[in-house]
Image: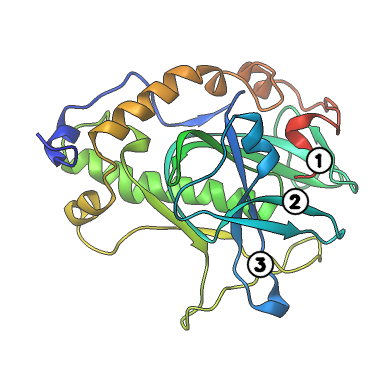
Amino acid sequence: MSDQDLSYLDSFSTQYDDGFAQGDGSLRINWYNGAPMLRTPGAFFVTKRRMEALGVEALGSPWREVTRVFASGEEEDGWETAKLRISPIGVRTQDCAVKTDGGLEFLTGRYTKENRPPGWSIYVELMCMIEGFSGPVKWSAKRIKTSMAIINGWRAYRKEILDEARRARKNPRIPAWAFWVTVSSAVDAKGKPVYEDTSEGGPKVTPPMWQWPVGTTEQRIAAMYVGASLLHQGRDIRESFDTFFTTNIDGTPTDAASAKSTSTPVSATAPELDSF
């Protein structure tokens, strides 16, 4: 049996579901918006210092080494790609407030439009496998446009790809990481990046868009299937990072999400939150 033999999907199973998780991670990547004046698309970026902390010297294709210049004038060495294939393992979210200095205050509970604090947003972490790196990855976001793009992309993937594949292969336990999803900037009919306004009235943004091939369910399955080896690797990652699915992003137990909405400040200088 070859690694890409689709019949393996008919029987592969894990004890894990693929619902939202309510932490831990490894290499963390972020999405940065493109520049409207330069007509550039958004891109994934990971800092060199994060890679060095994990003993990673370089990333494979499609990543390229860059020096990113931020609005503040500061520079950061790292690796970047405008288009990336990801194999999603699971998502967790938590309400937060983004302060004017970029720091975060994580919040317990859920907020309505009537009681949201200043700077309210949703912090999202997607555990996944990616092209160009062999280990577990967290794609994180704290700005509402990018966060909702991740959440909505995950939901659409579940409905249009994963659920359909489970029905077609008659295996309801096919895991979320069974398929590759391509993520890049949304584009218009001419293939140019789409720039969207934000509710805060700040610079326009280029939200990431989840994409998959056009075709029948079987055609999509064949084109997107990660193969037997990555099915097992994804299961190993899921087992190794089980606390990702049993804690909130701020480290509190998941049952805290059902408590009455109260705010719990988190240090803005925490290493995982610095400048991103």
- Whole-percent x, y for residue 37 in the image: 72, 79
Earlier in the chain: of badge 2 and badge 1, it is 2
At numbered mark 1, what does the secondary structure look like: helix, strand or loop?
strand
* Image quadrant containing the C terminus: top right
At numbered mark 3, what does the secondary structure look like: helix, strand or loop?
loop
Q: Nearer the viewer, mark 3 or mark 2?
A: 2
At numbered mark 2, what does the secondary structure look like: helix, strand or loop?
strand
Residue at 50% in and 61% down: 184
Model colouring: rainbow
Task: Count neighbours of disc 2 (C-alpha within 10 A) and say few if under 14, some if 14 to 19, many if 20 or more.
Answer: some
Q: Relative to residue 270, is residue 12 drawn left or right?
A: left
Which residue is more in the foreground, 254 or 66? 66
Q: Which image quarter: residue 11?
A: top left
Q: Which image quarter: residue 252?
A: top right
Residue at 25% in and 24% down: 13
Task: Count neighbours of disc 1 (C-alpha within 10 A) and say few if under 14, some if 14 to 19, many if 20 or more.
Answer: many
Earlier in the chain: of badge 3 and badge 2, it is 3
Mark identifier at residue 97: 1
Q: Please state which amino acid type lies under the numbered disc 1.
A: Ala
Mark identifier at residue 76: 2
- Whole-percent x, y for residue 193 in the image: 57, 74
Residue at 63% in and 65% down: 206
Of all residues, the one furthest to the front in this rendering is 57
